Image (tube, rainbow, N blue to C red):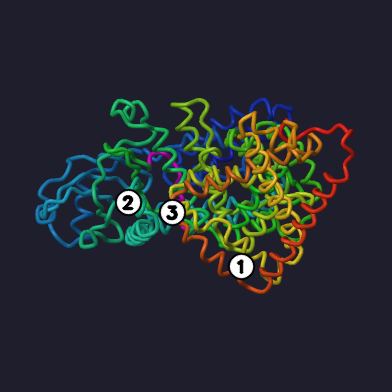
Amino acid sequence: MLQVAVELGSFAASIYLDQKRGQLQANMWKRAVELREKLTRLGPTFVKVGQGLSTRPDLCPPEYLEELTKLQDSLPTFPDIEAFSCIENELGATLESIYSEISPSPIAAASLGQVYKARLQSGEVVAVKVQRPDIEEAIALDFYLLRELSQLVDNYVEIVSSNVVALLDEFATRVYQELNYVQEAHNAVKFKQLYGDRPDVIVPGVFWNCTSSKVLTMVWIDGIKLSEQEAIEKRGLNILQLVDTGIQCSLRQLLEHGYFHADPHPGNLLATSDGKLAFVDFGMMSETPEQARFAIIGHVVHLVNRDYEAMAQDYYALDFLSSEVDVSPIVPVLKGFFDDVLNATVSELNFKTIVDGLGAVLYQFPFDVPPYYALILRSLTVLEGLALYTDPNFKVLAAAYPYFAKRLLTDSNPYLRDALIELLFKDGSFRWNRLENLLIQGRKSSDFVANDALQPVVKLLLGPEGAELRILVEKEAIRVMEALILGTAVEGYRAIPEPLKALVGGGSNASPIRMKESEQSAMLVLRAQILRIWSLLQNSKGFDPAMLEPIVEVLRQPEAQAIGGRVAGGLTQRLAARLLQQLLRPASTPAKAISE
């Protein structure tokens, strides 16, 4: 207690004096470095706590977040004789009977254990992770003392709005789970089942007969840590491709299955010689609630639309704020920050800029950021930082956007279906450019399948909840059909040789159909856009004319036939009105021909 009190008490005293002297902001970096050094001296538990704090923008200012990310798991190793004795005691056999060879010293050391490279008697090369002796007792004492200090912080430090005791309890639970190597082995198996299907991802298998609560034996992965970028480049590997694989896998973890790697630092990611990305160390895993998975995607849609009121409301669904908290003061802060950074398109934004800015917002208000959200933000920030080493122009959101686009276009979840409609419709008009962009981005996702695109919206359109949407769609369908018919006539007329145009035009080279130049231009632009969108679908992976069969079946429903009848009637009226206008137009009235 005295050691902890001296180290952390002197740090608290420094902060207090800075505040009294008005130097709190000026000394922020200095104090962040000081905290990192003190946590390192205090040992494994405090290193783990510091790493946890590095993912909490609601608890720490940006300067502390960046400095605490430098905390490494690399700690002094414990004697090999103790490690080998632990292996024999846990597995109930001599070292010689288990391994034909084992490295005389550890090839890696972490806060809770160290790793040896070995070869089993059966010939497989394995990684053997051995727990530090007496680590459970040391961690128990550390967390007991930290909990006492946390209660003091909750009772007397007003600047910290979160419940520190509750946060520490949850973090301690995760650390204790990490101490159980049997649980870690189960985590690895589950992770491999969910994400090992990707051809560019490797998850090592477990040797259960050589695994216990304090000894974990897994397939040896011969690779280079993503943090060792010079070594990766010397191997001729593409770091950007590896980072993109990490981003896509992270998004699947967070937003698809909700089960993800909760220790996001580059030392746990390895680049193999054939360019694949290997995940290791499954001691700390976490889960994303189902509601939050969809709310995060909706949050991105609201960001694209600059709908800051909706963004603020999302924090309820994300469980950042209790329902009693008024979000209205947050809206202008979000607007002030994102209006500046959104001058670029979303795909061009620097992810760290957004995270730092959003972290500053979270730090100002009574947010309680769930661990899953903080961890995934940290994970994506780390991946972007690795990529920036190779390409200063790399943007993690550009790499992530295809996944969001694919989910919006193909997922039938009501929340995402509504988010797609919100993205595509504005003020009663359909935004074809947004649909085209979604298809362009969605096709970049490796698991995008054309026949899944837009079918959820078609089903909504014909369902009982789609009455208001049907009115907008019918109006847009009439406009599109008119553009296709008249636009095709224009393009066909333009293709006719000049001598024949006079015959078609009744002695004049001008087209028989005339309209305002602005209307003509808009119609041709719309037609071209529709044809581009159809071409994107045709050239997408998995496209088959048979993909239209489910839609055709849906269109046979009575409501669909009624929509078709109304669209046909509206189109007929529009074309008839145009024809009558052409017939009644005085010959002397100047007009712009469609062909001009």
Q: Residues within 10 Å of mark 2 (few under 14, many from 20)?
A: many
Q: CA distance from mark 3 to mark 1?
A: 22 Å
Is residue 64 in sight in this rendering?
Answer: no
Q: Which mark is residue 546?
A: none
Q: Earlier in the sequence, mark 3 or mark 1?
A: 3
- The foreground one among 309 and 406 is 406
Q: Secondary structure at mark 2?
A: loop
Residue 421 horizontal/vertical position (percent): 68, 55
Residue stretch in magenta: 258-268
Which residue is label 3 attached to?
Answer: 542
Residue 200 position in % (x across, y down): 34, 45
Q: Is residue 176 left or right of residue 113?
A: right
Q: Residue at x 62, y 60 (%)?
A: 457
Q: Residues within 10 Å of mark 1 (few under 14, many from 20)?
A: some
The residue that disc 1 covers is 555
- Given the current orientation, which residue lies at the most extreme bottom position? 558
Callout count: 3
Secondary-structure class at tag 3: loop
Q: Are marks 1 and 2 in contact (CB under 8 Å)?
A: no
Q: Is residue 22 magenta?
A: no
